[in-house]
């Protein structure tokens, strides 16, 4: 699977990662097996958060990566309500305990907080100095928020911005992607298939995806992931529990679309007007 630089960190990760939002709601053994299967297929980037199942998702990840820590790039997130300077440090330590690891590869602020951003960033830098995180980033930040964070932290400190991005929600294409590319910040797409509303084969957009998929001997979801990661600073973290879905996601990391394919998808799923960055 293709690997790309994770923003300014210098680390390379697979273009397709594994999301774990709501992974704790199903069969635990299946969830653990899915994450392990992803590692087998080269899906090294595993994303989780203290919010997911109130820590249950982190515990599933812990079980999945037991004995395989070196193969994984682990990302977790602090809730905005916990994102004071002291609260961020404490939240990180709790996440590390649940994950049963001594450091995170990247730690994110889940969305903008009422706590002063300079305090959160100071905590991130403290955690980095202490070796508890190797890098830090943001999630659900628009360009204004990204610029504020960069003014506080300096150039080259923000590793990534994790944002909602799927074919029917392309708001980040107006400004966020280009700002991140200019500033060497990775863009990580969460919920890349939407929320149970992936376009079906009977819809106009679904037909376009199916036609392109057939030409590449791929699946429509693989085509969608390839479109969403078509630029070099774009990564995606789809969630999957079924082994077949994990395998399907992994194969998307080797699919390259033509300019004609990209144009067809662009027309089928219009960008729309610029507006406030959405979140889930």
Image: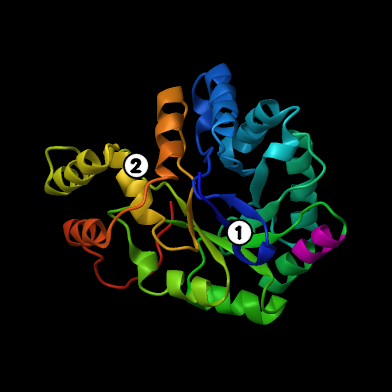
Pick the residue in front: 109 or 201.
201
Q: Looking at the picture, how far across and down is residue 209, in whole percent?
A: 21, 45
Total of numbered circles in the picture?
2
Q: Earlier in the sequence, mark 1 or mark 2?
A: 1
Q: Residue at x 67, y 40 (%)?
A: 72
Q: Which residue lies furthest to the bottom in this view?
A: 151
Q: Distance between the residues labelled 1 and 2?
A: 21 Å
Q: Measuring 31% from the left and 38% from the top, which residue is drawn there? A: 196
Q: Quadrant of residue 199?
A: top left
Left or right: where 138 falls relative to 214: right
| Residue 125 counted in the magenta span | yes
Query: Which residues make up the magenta segment?
Result: 124-129
* Label 2 Cα neighbours within 10 Å, binned few <14 / some 14-19 / many ≥20: many
Indicate how the structure is coloured in the image: rainbow
Task: Name the residue tied to disc 2.
Answer: 222
Q: x, y (%) of residue 200?
A: 19, 38
**Secondary element at image label 1:** loop
| Horizontal arrangement in the rendering, residue 149 relative to residue 181 (left or right) | right
**Which residue bears the numbered disc 1?**
6
In this view, 141 is above or below 55: below
Q: Can residue 197 be seen in this view?
A: no
Q: Label 1: how many residues lie within 10 Å, few (<14), some (14-19) or many (20+)?
A: many
Side of 119 relative to 193 (left or right):
right
Dot 2 falls on a residue whose secondary structure is: helix
Residue 243 seen in the current view = yes
Q: CB of mark 1 within 8 Å of CB of mark 2? A: no
Residue found at the very far right of the displayed protein:
130
Residue 139 placement (x, y as % from top left): 55, 59
27 magenta-colored: no
The residue that appears at 67% across and 44% down in the rendered structure is 74
């Amino acid at each position: 699977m293709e690997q790309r630089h994770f923003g300014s960190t210098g680390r390379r990760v697979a273009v397709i990662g594994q999301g774990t939002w709501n992974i704790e709601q199903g069969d635990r053994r299946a969830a653990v097996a899915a994450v392990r299967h992803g590692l087998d297929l080269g899906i090294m980037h595993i994303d989780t958060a203290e919010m997911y199942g109130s820590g249950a998702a982190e515990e599933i990840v812990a079980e999945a990566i037991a004995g395989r820590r070196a193969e994984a790039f682990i990302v977790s997130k602090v809730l905005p309500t916990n994102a004071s300077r002291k609260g961020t440090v404490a939240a990180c330590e709790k996440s590390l305990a649940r994950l049963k690891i001594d450091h995170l590869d990247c730690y994110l602020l889940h969305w903008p907080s009422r706590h002063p951003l300079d305090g959160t960033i100071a905590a991130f830098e403290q955690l980095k100095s202490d070796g508890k995180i190797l890098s830090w980033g943001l999630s659900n930040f628009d360009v204004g928020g990204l610029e504020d964070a960069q003014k506080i932290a300096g150039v080259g400190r923000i590793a990534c911005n994790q944002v909602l991005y799927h074919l029917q929600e392309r708001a980040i294409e107006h400004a966020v992607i280009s700002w991140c590319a200019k500033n060497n910040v990775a863009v990580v797409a969460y919920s890349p298939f939407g929320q149970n509303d992936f376009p079906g084969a009977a819809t106009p957009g679904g037909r376009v995806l199916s036609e392109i998929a057939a030409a590449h001997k791929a699946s429509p979801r693989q085509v969608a992931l390839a479109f969403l990661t078509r630029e070099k600073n774009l990564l995606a973290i789809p969630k999957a529990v079924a082994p077949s879905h994990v395998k399907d996601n992994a194969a998307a990391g080797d699919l390259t679309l033509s300019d004609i394919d990209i144009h067809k998808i662009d027309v089928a799923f219009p960008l729309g007007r610029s507006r406030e960055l959405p979140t889930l």
